[in-house]
Amino acid sequence: MTEGTATIRTRKFMSNRLLNRKQMVVDVIHPGQASIAKTVIREKLAKMYKAPADTIFVFGFKTAFGGGKTTGFGLIYDTLDFAKKFEPKYRLARHGLYERPKTTRKQRKERKNRMKKVRGTKKTKVGAAAAKKV
Amino acid sequence: MVQAGEDAEAVCQQDLPQALKLLFEMNESADKVSSLVDSMLSQVKRGELATEEGLSFLEVKYHTLLSYLINLSHVVLRKVSGASIYNEPCIDRLVELRTVLERLRPIDKRLKYQIDKLVKTAVTGESSDASSFRANPDNMVSKLDEDADVNEDEDAATEKKSVYVPPKLAPVRYDWDESAASRQEKLLERAKRRALSSAMVRELREEFLDAPTELGSRVDSGAGPSGPSKEDRERQEYEETYFTRLPETKDKRKKRKLPTIGSLANELTNFESDFRVLEGEVMPTKKRKSSKKPTGKKGKKGFKKRKSR
């Protein structure tokens, strides 16, 4: 219920020049509350490190048994371009920067098997034509 | 740099008369050598030098080496002064001398023993007895076989005792000559430390000391009385260094769901030994895993039951 009474501390701060980012372990202390949302943590980190919130990615939050303390990881990229280059797709998808192709695994495999029956440039036609089939 | 140039000039000035003298000497010796060679050639032509048996092997060897060196220095001189060595006769001579040396090598190897012996006698000045050059059978026994002979004698002695020594296959703890008493002492110390931090003692401490009560601040990462176990600590360190979360193992999940399963009863009942160890009355006993239950119909116990009938 009480908002904003969580404390964020960072440990093991390292500036990783190879991946153009700063990485750290984030400790969130929130006695008597449920664990804090990742968006709130991102905003707090943005204030602490004076970086735009969209270049901050946090993940891996685990609450200690008994509550009160949560530990996770945080990465702050230099620019959004670097973030798009180095971050795994699922984390970009969490921020809305990436959309997974909607085709299911089964459909992809069926399309591939249909393409196997044809040789050359007809492959693309087969795939599209068969997909349009109901 | 200008100073160095000046110094070089001064040195040159000093060395100049010496260099001139040396060059003059060289000229003189070259003249002498050429006159000697001419006289030798004339001698050979007249047949005064005995060349019927040819040259001995060793003489051939060092003559070829010398000529090789002379030709090589000539090639180097030409290269250093910038001239080309294309179609130089000295290159052909070098090749010829090289092949001669290569042919000499295996013969040299075969003669090695005799030559070494001769050199040794020449150096030590020992007997010129021809029989001293015979083969030495003692040299044929290799030094390694001596140790094998010694071991065989020892094994023959121990065989009489016929004590079976098992092969050392698996690694075993090494005590560095620790006496039994010191080992007992160490065990006692460890048991005391464990007793001091046991649940019973902690509760007593809370009751009787004036320190403020600590609520469960470290409950999961601090699972045991002295903080997280070694395994937990290692996992934490790994996760924080590599920025990953390791998946939860089966036992960990069970422990999370039912934290006191299997351990609560033991905690409640095994508190006597702790106090006794602290007072020094009882020696610490080894932790023994509880014996397994009878394994049903097909287990050993079942089989025994049937047999006893």
Image (cartoon, coloured by chain):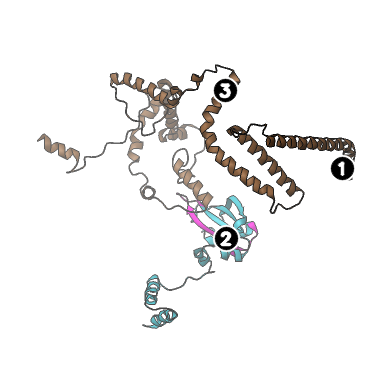
Indicate the amino acid at tag 3.
Answer: Lys
User: How many numbered callouts?
Assistant: 3
- Circle number at residue B29: none
For label 1, count other residues whose C-alpha is less than 10 Å away and answer few (under 14), some (14-19) or many (20+).
Answer: few
The reply to whether dot 3 and dot 1 touch (C-beta < 8 Å) is no
The reply to whether dot 3 and dot 2 touch (C-beta < 8 Å) is no
Q: Position of residue A71 (x, y in %)?
A: 51, 52
- Which tint is chain A? cyan
Of labels 3 and 2, the one closer to you: 3
Q: What's drawn in magenta, residue-wise? A: A49-70
- Circle number at residue A42: 2
Q: Chain drawn brown, letter?
A: B
Q: Position of residue B245 (x, y in %)?
A: 47, 53
Residue extending furthest left?
B309
Location of mark 1 (residue)? B4
Q: Quadrant of residue B197?
A: top left
When the figure is inspected, residue B296 is found, relative to residue B136, above or below; the finding is below
- Circle number at residue B120: 3
Residue B180 vs residue B211, the one in the foreground: B180
